Amino acid sequence: MAQALRPNTAGSLLATDGRTHPLQDTLMAVTLVLGAVAFITAMFHSLHLLSSWAGLVGIFTGAYGQWVSETTRERFGLILGLGASGVGFFLGMAHGGLFGGLW
């Protein structure tokens, strides 16, 4: 029963390997923030530039994060961010696109 007395050194629920992953955690956080920005600004027609660009960058950041991710926690956050980025990107494209109204 010695294992029952050991503290949880993983730091989170789904980080299964017990090591830190600073690059992957940063990519996950950036993807989640960009996804939230893209999703929220996609609800406003006049913010199509912000939503489409934030969504596009969030999609690329999340795709690279999926490629280098090592734990389930990272993949879970990346999928949430990718989904929000995708919705924000496509709604931003429908409202005017990446360069709509600039020229």
Image: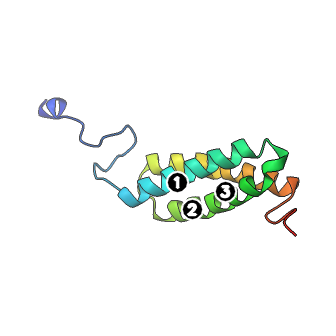
From the viewer's side, name the closer residue of 45 and 1: 45
Residue 36, compared with residue 30, is above or below; it is: above
Residue at mark 2 to residue at mark 3: CA–CA distance: 10 Å
Q: Are marks 2 and 1 in contact (CB under 8 Å)?
A: yes
Q: Quadrant of the N terminus?
A: top left
Q: Amino acid at mark 3?
A: Ala
- Figure disc tally: 3
- Residue extending furthest front? 103
Answer few, some or many: residues within 10 Å of disc 2's Cα (few below 14, many 20 plus, some between 14 and 19).
many
95 displayed left or right of 83? right
The C terminus is located in which quarter? bottom right
Please give the residue where the numbered disc 1 appears in the rendered image: 30
- Residue at 54% across / 51% down in the picture? 78
Q: Give the Cα distance between marks 2 and 1.
A: 8 Å
Q: Position of residue 93 (x, y in %)?
A: 82, 58
Whichever of labels 3 and 1 marks the residue nearer the N terminus, that label is: 1
Label 2 residue SS: helix
Q: Are marks 2 and 3 in contact (CB under 8 Å)?
A: no
Quadrant of residue 41 in the image? top right
Q: What residue is at 61 percent from the left and 64 percent from the top?
A: 60
